[in-house]
Image (spheres, rainbow, N blue to C red):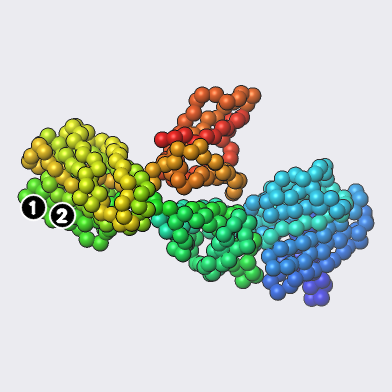
Amino acid sequence: MLGEIMEWFYHDLAGIQPDPSGPGFKKIIIAPTIVGGLTSATASYNSANGFITNQWSLNGNLVTMKTTVPPGSTATVYLPTLQTNLPSVAIQESGVIIWTNGAVAGSSPNVTFAGTLTTNAQTSLLWAIGSGNYQFTWNIFPAPSGLTAVAVNNQVGLTWNPVSGATGYNVKRAAVSGGPYTTIAGGVTGTNYTDSTVTNGGTYYYVVSALASTGESNNSFEVNATPQFILNFGFETPSISIYQYNPTGGSWTFTAQSGSSGSGITANNSLFTTGNPAAPQGIQSAFLQGVSTISQTISGFVPGLKYNLTFAAAQRATYENGGQTWNVKIDNTVIGSYSPAASATNYTNYTANFTASAPTHTLAFVGTDLHGGDNTVFLDNIQLTPAPSLTPPQIGWQFASGRIQFSWPIDHYGWRLQMQANPPGTGLGTNWSTVPGSQTTNWMALPLNMGCGSVFFRLAYP
């Protein structure tokens, strides 16, 4: 009984084990067990080649382990953690840092990364080391990855990847990059949070940490966002299975049916949309039939500032009598008139612009039905944004979780992020292509490994 306990102290708690693939302790395994309630363990073993020692200590979620491998021996070190990424690991050999922040900081033929091993929902990071004195430092509980921030009108929406074993998350915010951070939401149980305590025009910096019974993880990579008047209107609420005139429960006001006039919402593949492509945003679109209207009162405008309106529209493929015509109005002023051919049944983007004269305006789509009869147009993906600045922008970037994240000023919303990927040894060319979706945001995250030699990025005016 006592012998078995002592063996557990050496073999499991301190983690000193012979490697079955080698004789005696010629090959060694160092695989400590971090036990809840214990903050440290130390053990040594006098092998035929000399003393093997291992000592670990736990401070919150940070583990520091000092290991000695005698001359003539090699070892495989198992670092138990709940994460699989390397940036949290720092390694020193005889006091010299040889690995930190996920990259080699020095050179040592005695240390190589040997992969990962997952057992019982716990991942161990494996390192092959030679004889010598080493110190390993790592976080046993990982920080959340993949944090993103999307700014809209007076709000910032945050999302991040779940952390295995986390009981909750702390969301933190700062007024300047790098902090100090203030916790604005503690113990969040999901992997998203909306910060509604922000003001348009201010830039806010965010990090997220994970919580567990052992404590709190490090902070995630920092992201930032600048909320502005940027509105995107689909017609996904209320959810409609076929089509419905004058629905309630959404942000828009519709017109009740009266003969061949009326407005409402229709789903993809309904009687209304047979023969038309799917809605460009979601699975529903609005319909504007005859001389009906669709309207919404919107606040948050800055008087004197110019705004761009973009929307997608498609003529109904059936029951058309020359095609629908319509106006777009701000309050009672027409800012755009449209009369595409009845054959324009694919969704096309249309634009208009206006200068705000008050903090609140009413946006309306008004059917004019100049051809008469039963004519209908479908509307979707209505976007209302400040007109993009003409000033050459500064484009920011950072590395996070295997991606490169770009951001640019919010007043350049509408610009396009463009890239070109060229073979090794070639420079800048002319083969620019627009990153899909970049003209409807002010940030994009792209994978680091693009399978090419050189990648160039730029912002282009719309």
Q: Amino acid at mark 1?
A: Ser
From the top left corner, tell me how far across and down residue 102 is, in percent: 69, 48
Looking at numbered disc 2 in the image, what kind of residue is underneath it? Answer: Thr
Rendered position, 116 above or below 168? above
| Residue 433 versus residue 330 in the image, above or below | above
Q: Nearer the viewer, residue 326 or 428?
A: 326
Could you say where residue 218 lies in the image, as x and y percent from the top left? Answer: 64, 61
What's the mark number on residue 258? 1
Q: CA distance from mark 1 to mark 2?
A: 9 Å
Vertical placement of residue 130 versus 250, above or below: above
**Visible residue check, residue 200:** yes
**Element type where label 2 sits in the image:** loop
Describe the element under mark 1 as helix, strand or loop.
loop
Residue wearing tag 2: 255
127 lies left or right of 222: right
Do callouts 1 and 2 mark residues in contact (Cβ within 8 Å)?
A: yes
